[in-house]
């Protein structure tokens, strides 16, 4: 009976130590950043170069919010080369970009309103 009391006492003490630790860990977490990933949205940009044969377009773009990417100029591969056929150098556009296997692909591009 003494052993059972000791086991219960030790268990109670260990729970008393473990519970405050877990609540402290929860308080330290930033629950605002734990939401679902941001929905993909169109990004504003300007066409700097089009390579129809390679299916690539260089765009100077603003922040791509759903990818947490700052504005910059970069080369994107078109998911479908045909979406690049009517682009003109210097044209202001809106485009959709997705990331797959570490690469960025333009899936939609249209003149900016």
Image (spheres, rainbow, N blue to C red):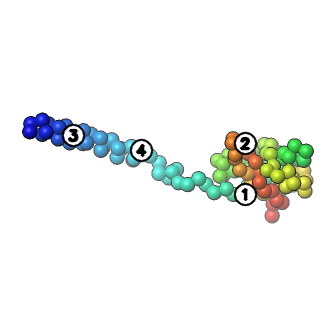
Mark 2 or 1 closer to N-term? 1
Mark carried by residue 18? none
Q: Which badge, 2 or 4, is on the more N-terminal residue?
A: 4
**Quarter that holds the N terminus:** top left
Return the mark for residue 103.
Answer: 2
Relative to 112, is 66 on the left or the right?
left
The answer to whether residue 9 is above or below residue 106 is above
Q: Nearer the viewer, mark 2 or mark 4?
A: 2
- At x 34%, y 46%, the residue is 23
**C-alpha distance separating marks 2 and 3:** 52 Å
As measured in the structure, the alpha-carbon distance from the residue carrying label 2 to the one carrying label 4 is: 33 Å
> Could you tell which of marks 4 and 1 lies nearer the N-terminus?
4
Q: Could you say whether the residue bearing mark 4 is in a helix, strand or loop?
A: helix
- Secondary structure, mark 3, is helix
Q: Is residue 101 left or right of residue 84?
A: left
The answer, for residue 96, to whether it is visible in the render is: yes
Question: Which image quarter: residue 16?
Answer: top left
């Amino acid at each position: 009976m003494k052993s059972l009391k000791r086991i219960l006492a030790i268990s109670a003490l260990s729970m008393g130590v473990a519970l405050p630790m877990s609540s402290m860990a929860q308080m330290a977490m930033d629950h605002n950043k734990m939401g679902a990933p941001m929905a993909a949205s169109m990004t504003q940009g300007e066409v700097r170069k089009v390579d129809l044969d390679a299916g690539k377009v260089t765009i100077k773009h603003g922040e791509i919010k759903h990818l947490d990417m700052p504005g910059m100029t970069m080369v994107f591969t078109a998911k479908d080369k045909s979406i690049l056929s009517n682009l003109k150098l210097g044209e202001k556009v809106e485009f959709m970009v997705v990331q797959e296997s570490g690469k960025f692909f333009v899936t939609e591009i249209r003149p900016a309103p």
